[in-house]
């Protein structure tokens, strides 16, 4: 505890210099939430989180994975959503949620991995079914999620992606607070082909690179967060027509050799909302 407090005191006194330090180093080094009123600040990919709640590592119908990352924090609205979704999961044939990354204790850019997950409103849910027993700590670090893709990567493997995976994604998408669900293009294709009746929920489910091992849920800005930047509305329609087909179109042939693009600049503290400096040093 003393070491963490000392680090926060140092940050408070060195904040002007820290403004040029990659924000992922600053936020990734803090192990505890900011003791402030709960709120999500900024945008999903450029912001921070005050007053975070911790999703317990075990619940009646969920288990948190990769505990060493300390990323099972979120806005209280996200924690409540996950507990509510987990409670409903058995009703659609899904034993329970294996929860991956949510946010760091104070949000912000992550030391590794995601560009989003910065304001405590994003969560990754494994597409691997939860076992009926409790994983050990060691298993939570080493057990791998399973890709749902067939060897050609263009479609799902029906031996892995079944009605159970379909049903839990649909259940999540139908929750009113959900803004987006990101899945692999092949999973979106399988959802489009399997959906019948009400298809409105499909508009929230968007194809994105990766996301064949898990689905990424993003909820709306809650009322406790006036400076949270909301997600734009999805395009009209279910996204199963030309939009989905565009993900399968071959890339255009380059007319001339392309130069490799330089990596994007690191996000620093000065690139985040001013409130994030206060969140970072609060003690």
Image (cartoon, rainbow, N blue to C red):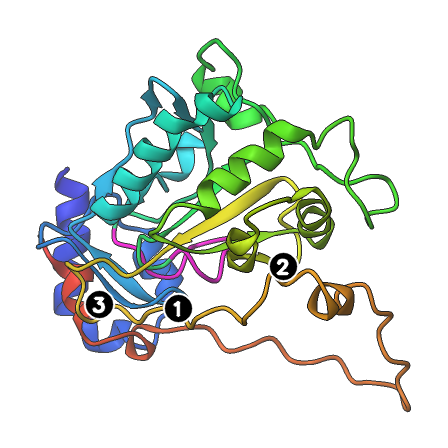
Q: Closer to the observer: label 2 or label 1?
A: 1
Q: Say left or right for 196 vs 71.
A: right
Residue 267, placed above or below residue 189 = below
Q: Which mark is residue 208?
A: 2
Q: Which residue is mark 1?
A: 231
Q: Tag 1 or tag 2, which sits nearer the N-term?
A: 2
Q: Residue furthest front?
A: 197
| Magenta span dominant secondary structure | loop
Q: Position of residue 68 (x, y in %)?
A: 41, 33
Distance between mark 3 and mark 2 Cα atoms: 28 Å
The quadrant where residue 261 appears = bottom right
**Which region of the structure is painted magenta?**
106-117
- Please say whether residue 169 is visible from this viewpoint: yes
Q: Which residue appears at 40% of the width and 31% of the height?
A: 67
Q: Which residue appears at 54% of the width and 71% of the height?
A: 236
Q: Which residue is mark 3?
A: 276
């Amino acid at each position: 505890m003393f070491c963490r407090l000392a680090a926060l005191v140092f940050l408070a006194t060195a904040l002007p210099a820290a403004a040029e330090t990659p924000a992922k180093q600053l936020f990734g080094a803090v192990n505890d939430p900011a003791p402030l009123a709960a709120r999500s600040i900024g945008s999903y990919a450029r912001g921070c989180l005050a007053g975070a709640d911790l999703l317990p590592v075990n619940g009646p119908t969920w288990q948190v994975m990769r505990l060493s990352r300390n990323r099972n924090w979120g806005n209280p609205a996200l924690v409540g959503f996950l507990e509510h979704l987990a409670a409903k999961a058995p009703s659609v044939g899904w034993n329970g949620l294996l929860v991956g990354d949510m946010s760091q204790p104070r949000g912000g850019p992550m030391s590794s991995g995601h560009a989003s997950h910065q304001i405590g409103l994003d969560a990754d849910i494994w597409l691997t079914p939860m076992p009926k027993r409790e994983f050990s700590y060691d298993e939570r670090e080493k057990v791998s999620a399973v890709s749902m893709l067939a060897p050609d990567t263009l479609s799902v493997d029906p031996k892995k992606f079944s009605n159970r995976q379909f049903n839990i994604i649909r259940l999540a998408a139908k929750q009113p607070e959900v803004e987006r669900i990101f899945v692999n293009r092949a999973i979106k294709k399988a959802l489009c082909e399997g959906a019948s009746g009400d298809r409105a929920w499909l508009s929230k489910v968007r194809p994105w690179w990766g996301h064949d091992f898990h689905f990424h849920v993003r909820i709306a800005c809650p009322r406790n967060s006036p400076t949270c930047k909301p997600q734009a509305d999805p395009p009209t329609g279910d996204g199963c027509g030309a939009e989905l087909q565009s993900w399968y179109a071959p890339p255009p042939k380059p007319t001339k050799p392309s130069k490799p693009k330089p990596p994007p600049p690191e996000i620093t503290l000065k690139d985040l909302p001013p409130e994030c400096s206060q969140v970072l040093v609060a003690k």
